[in-house]
Image: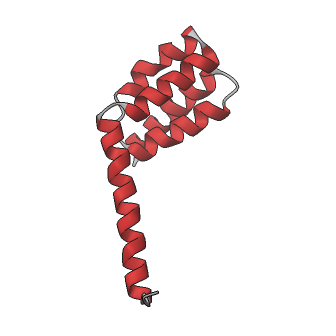
């Protein structure tokens, strides 16, 4: 087995992370992540969940979409997801 220096290992890890981020971004561009959100909202909350989707569909930042997806998975109601979307929007405007 070939020896890998610490610098090489760090470079490889950064490359992997960059590749993952690019893959996620391509997924957003192709509608995969927003589509996953739509599916979660529909399955958990029915028509009320789908009412929220148009607000989420316009979001382009992958980290924000991922956080909203995690919120939707854990939320007990569609209103919780809606509040999270609006709260994050307001937080971005203040900065």
Looking at the image, which residue is at 34% across and 58% down? Answer: 19
Name the side, left or right, on which 28 lies relative to 44: left
Name the side, left or right, on which 84 lies relative to 7: right
Looking at the image, which residue is at 39% across and 64% down? Answer: 16
Q: Percent from the top left, x then y, of residue 55?
A: 41, 23
Residue nearest the observer in this picture, 34 or 19: 19
Q: Classify 95 as above or below 37.
A: below
Q: Percent from the top left, x then y, of residue 15?
A: 35, 68
Q: Residue furthest right?
A: 76
- Displayed quadrant of residue 8: bottom left
Residue nearest the observer in this picture, 94 or 23: 23
Q: Classify 13 as above or below 23.
A: below
Q: Percent from the top left, x then y, of residue 5?
A: 42, 90
Looking at the image, which residue is at 42% across and 35% down? Answer: 33
Q: Percent from the top left, x then y, of residue 46?
A: 59, 12
Name the side, left or right, on which 81 lies relative to 75: left
Residue nearest the observer in this picture, 48 or 21: 21
Looking at the image, which residue is at 56% across and 25% down? Answer: 40
Q: Residue furthest top?
A: 47
Say whether residue 91 is visible. Answer: no
Q: How many marks?
A: 0
- Displayed quadrant of residue 56: top left
Q: Classify 14 as above or below 65.
A: below
Say whether residue 88 is visible. Answer: yes
Looking at the picture, the colour scheme in use is secondary structure
């Amino acid at each position: 087995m070939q020896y890998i220096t610490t610098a090489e290992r760090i470079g490889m890890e950064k490359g992997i992370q960059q590749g993952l981020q690019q893959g996620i971004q391509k997924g957003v561009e192709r509608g995969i992540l927003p589509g996953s959100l739509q599916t979660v909202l529909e399955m958990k909350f029915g028509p009320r969940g789908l009412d929220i989707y148009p607000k989420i569909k316009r979001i382009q930042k992958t980290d924000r979409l991922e956080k909203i997806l995690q919120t939707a998975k854990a939320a007990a109601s569609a209103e919780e997801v809606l509040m999270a979307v609006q709260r994050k929007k307001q937080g971005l405007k203040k900065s």
